[in-house]
Amino acid sequence: MKHTVPIVLIAVFCLAGCVSVKPLTTPSGRQGFHLNCGGTGADWSTCYEEATKRCKGPYTIVDRSQDRTFTPYGPLINREMIIECPAWIFPNASKPAG
């Protein structure tokens, strides 16, 4: 019984879908973000909406991936996307060395 509550909470959290965001500098020196949009209750549109919000409009997808892990409680879906914002959005983003 001790393990049931944490497992149920994890399952509900994963079903609901959420987005975690980490800022980064892309290889071209522009501001970008790593978005993790996991959860079976969400789809790629969750990531796309967050990307639009973070870049204040248009963005470029640098990379994206999705994996699915099957568990006794249902599938756990992990979606990740790296985006790059246009230079005019964050004009002071660091430039690549070299």
Image (cartoon, grey):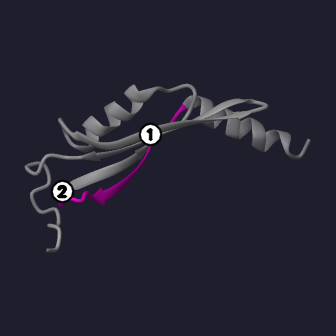
Q: Is residue 35 above or below residue 42?
A: below
Mark 2 residue element: loop
Is residue 24 part of the magenta span, yes or no?
Answer: yes
Left or right for 34, reference 84: right
Disc 1 to disc 2: CB gap under 8 Å: no
- Residue 70: quadrant of the picture: top right
Indicate which disc residue 27 carries.
none
Neighbour tally class for label 1: few under 14, some 14-19, many 20 plus, Cα within 10 Å = few
Q: Can you give x and y, in whole percent of width and height, for residue 33 in the image?
A: 32, 50
Determine the residue positioned at 46% across, 26% down.
43
Indicate which disc residue 30 carries.
2
Indicate which disc residue 65 carries.
1
Residue toward you, 17 or 77 = 77
Task: Name the kind of residue labelled 2 in the image.
Answer: Arg
Determine the residue positioned at 38% across, 34% down.
47
Left or right for 24, reference 43: left
- Residue 83: quadrant of the picture: top left
Q: Can you give x and y, in whole percent of width and height, for residue 87 in the image?
A: 10, 51
Select label 1 or label 2 by which is in front. 1
Tell me the quadrant of the picture where the C terminus can be found.
Answer: bottom left
Magenta range: 17-30
